[in-house]
Amino acid sequence: MAHWLVKSEPTDYSIEDLARDRLQLWDGVRNYQARNYLQAMAKGDRVFFYHSNAKPPGLVGLASVAQTQIVDPTQFDPQSKYYDPKATPERPRWYTVELAFERQFPLIPLDSLKAQFSPEELLLVRRGNRLSVMPIEEAIAPRLLALAGC
């Protein structure tokens, strides 16, 4: 089982929203590296949920991958802000996963994560990193889980 991290602005979609919905398609990712990470996910992988662009930003919960290799439907919708005119149903460009809520935990602020982890250990704390989906190293996941009280 691999571990991942996804970021979302809580005003767009929060951990509370995922707790309410229980399952959510993680659509709208429009960065090729982040898309590749989504395609690498396997059913059952655990996913740390991070609130970005919040005061303070930080880890707030845990989800798991419920379904993989889903063609992102927003790429075909001209009304969507994630519409991609170069994508077609025959040749989709964007894929996603469905996430299942596992648990919410007290916020672990970004400042605390920076104090606990080096940029080499945790991509999230690397200066200039803007990816919305990223892997979590196998040795780091238990430390994050311990910080969260899991």
Image: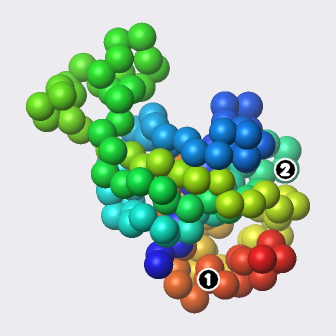
Task: Please say if 133 is above or below 119.
Answer: above
> In the visual, does 121 lie left or right of 17?
left
Q: Label for residue 56?
A: 2
How many discs mark residues in the rendered view? 2
The numbered mark, 1 or 2, whose residue comes first in the sequence reads: 2
Q: Residues within 10 Å of mark 1 (few under 14, many from 20)?
A: few
Residue found at the far bottom of this picture:
139
Task: Please say if 100 is above or below 135.
Answer: above
Q: Position of residue 116 (x, y in %)?
A: 76, 80
Helix, strand or loop at disc 1?
loop
Q: Position of residue 121 (x, y in %)?
A: 58, 81
Tag 1: amino acid: Ile
Q: Position of residue 123 (x, y in %)?
A: 56, 68
> In the visual, does 55 lie left or right of 92?
right
Q: Position of residue 32 (x, y in %)?
A: 33, 48
Q: Are marks 1 and 2 in contact (CB under 8 Å)?
A: no
Residue at figure coordinates x 80%, y 72% from the top left: 148
| Cα–Cα span, label 1 and label 2 | 22 Å
Residue found at the far left of this picture:
90
Residue 123, can we see it?
Answer: no
Residue 95, can we see it?
Answer: yes
Tag 2: amino acid: Pro
Helix, strand or loop at disc 2?
loop
Residue at figure coordinates x 33%, y 57% from the top left: 39
**The C terminus lies in which quarter of the figure?**
bottom right
> In the visual, does 92 lie left or right of 115?
left
Residue at figure coordinates x 58%, y 53% from the top left: 100
> In the visual, does 13 lie left or right of 55?
left
Location of mark 1 (residue)? 140
